[in-house]
Amino acid sequence: MNYLTSYLETKVMGADAMELITMLYERAILSLNIARESIMNGVDDPELVKKKATELCRATEILYYLNDILDRQKGGQISENLSLIYTTLAGELIRANLFNDIEIISKCIEVLNNLKAAWEDAKKQLRDNQHEQKRAFAGAI
């Protein structure tokens, strides 16, 4: 096992649910950037075509996984909206793979960056609320 693998395993094992979701977004975005770069570097090269397909498949699998783990009972309309976004993006990535469309990939990256930022904001807000509760409790003692 190399140091990078060990580091990543430690990072994942120590992460909470919101951090794991953010990591999945980061990996999907990385895969899409690699796929886009592969297309831009030439679709005549079989190795680049393979790399593009592999990375688009990886990003698509992440989207399906994110869709599968949605808690539709607790999440309500937000879960339904995220499900629609994830399935739409996955469909778009299939089209991008078929037609080597970097514009579609770029739009998907933009959407995922926005979703990632929203999750990061939610985590920050949750952390801030927890700090406020601790301060209020400490002040009451």
Image (cartoon, rainbow, N blue to C red):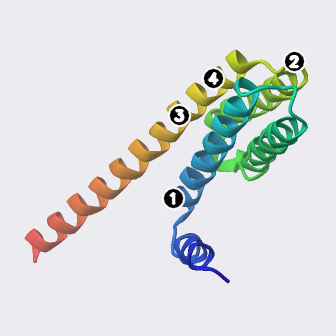
Give the numbered dot on residue 106.
4
Give the numbered dot on residue 99.
2
What crowding class fits label 4: few (fewer than 14 Cα within 10 Å), some (14-19), or many (20 or more)? Answer: some
- Secondary structure at badge 3 equals helix
Q: Which residue is mark 3?
A: 113
Q: Are marks 3 and 1 in contact (CB under 8 Å)?
A: no
Locate residue 75: give its quadrant.
Answer: top right
Quote the CA–CA distance across marks 3 and 1. 15 Å
Q: Nearer the viewer, mark 1 or mark 2?
A: 2
Mark 3 is on which residue type?
A: Asn
Q: Nearer the viewer, residue 126 or 40?
A: 40
**Precedes in sequence: disc 2 or disc 3:** 2
Give the numbered dot on residue 19.
1
Quote the CA–CA distance across marks 2 and 3. 23 Å
Locate residue 57: give its quadrant.
Answer: top right
**Precedes in sequence: disc 1 or disc 4:** 1
Q: Is residue 47 left or right of residue 102?
A: right
Give the numbered dot on residue 79.
none
